[in-house]
């Protein structure tokens, strides 16, 4: 597989073309951003950790029947992926209230939600990724129809149903996470992007210590140590 030109550089990854027009290379970066890129940082080795964590989680989800863009890892920090057209909706799935949910609705930090909450945010940096409802998604043409919207909501919840017990067995609370989906050339919805401590919140089950990007957002420090701990627990049999 030949790596060709850089097609796109996002906050956390670079996408390269390959000699196969249906396949891309996704390279995980060491950069960290928060608050719509107002806070910037870099943590050497973070890209490799996220690549390994995300690959493991995508492989687990594949075994459980979730279709993803991942083909295989190529090296420490890159994956060969299927080319998809990204649906511009961030699907945020929550088990415990924190972050923007507590700020927006005044729900007490740490409240265990009575059921899995799935929310949609419009992927638009200029607008600050606003929370949107089903009708907004359709008016914005972010999805073709209600059926696709329902499908990405159900996929978000199913991913949570698989990952929440997986992490619970490893003494980690999956507090919330963000996933993105894309359409392949045949219109199939595939899980895309990444699932990593950059896009999830993990709290230690015993101490509630944060083991995710909140360490960077809140300036707690030891970001890489926390990501290494998450990988170690994922690899635990
Ligand atoms: N999230 C993300 N990218 C974003 C916004 C949120 O990966 O652009 C993740 C975030 O890491 C957390 C979940 O989505 O796991 C919910 O984030 P929230 O809405 O609470 O936003 P925040 O408090 O980060 O502003």
Image: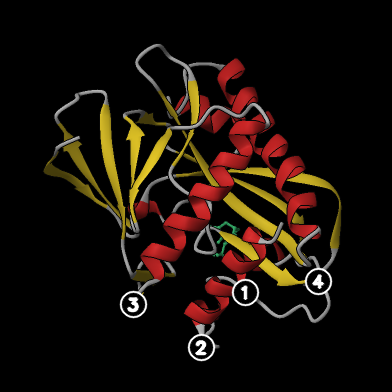
Which disc, if any, is residue 211? 1
Furthest-front residue in this view? 237
Which disc, if any, is residue 43? none
Tell me where residue 77 appears, x and y as whole percent. Answer: 34, 57
Q: CA distance from mark 2 to mark 1?
A: 10 Å
Tell me where residue 172 appears, x and y as whole percent. Answer: 74, 66
Residue drawn at 84 percent across, 66 percent down: 111
Q: Give the quadrant of the C terminus.
A: bottom right
Q: Nearer the viewer, residue 155 or 58?
A: 58
**According to the image, label 4 marks what residue?**
205
For the residues carrying marks 3 and 2, which lies nearer the camera in this image?
3
**According to the image, label 3 marks what residue?**
44
Residue drawn at 56 percent across, 20 percent down: 148
Q: CA distance from mark 1 to mark 4?
A: 11 Å
Question: In the image, 40: left or right of 104?
Answer: left
Residue 65, relative to residue 170: is it above or below? above
């Amino acid at each position: 597989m030949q790596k060709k030109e850089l097609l796109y550089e996002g906050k956390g990854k670079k996408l390269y073309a390959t000699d196969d027009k249906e396949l891309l290379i996704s390279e995980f970066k060491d950069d960290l951003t928060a608050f719509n890129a107002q806070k910037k940082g870099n943590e050497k080795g973070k890209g490799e950790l996220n690549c390994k964590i995300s690959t493991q989680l995508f492989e687990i989800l594949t075994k459980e029947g979730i279709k993803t863009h991942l083909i295989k890892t190529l090296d420490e920090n890159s994956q060969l992926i299927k080319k998809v057209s990204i649906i511009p909706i961030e699907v945020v799935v929550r088990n415990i209230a924190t972050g923007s949910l507590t700020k927006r609705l005044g729900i007490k930090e740490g409240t265990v939600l009575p059921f899995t909450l799935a929310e949609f945010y419009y992927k638009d940096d200029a607008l600050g990724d606003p929370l949107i409802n089903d009708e907004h998604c359709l008016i914005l043409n972010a999805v073709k129809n209600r059926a696709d919207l329902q499908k990405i909501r159900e996929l978000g919840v199913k991913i949570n149903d698989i990952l929440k017990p997986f992490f619970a067995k490893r003494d980690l609370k999956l507090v919330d996470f963000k996933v993105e989906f894309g359409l392949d050339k045949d219109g199939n919805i595939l899980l895309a992007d990444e699932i990593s401590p950059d896009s999830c919140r993990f709290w230690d089950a015993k101490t509630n210590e944060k083991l995710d990007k909140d360490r960077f957002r809140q300036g707690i420090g030891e970001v890489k140590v926390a990501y290494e701990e998450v990988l170690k627990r994922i690899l635990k049999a």
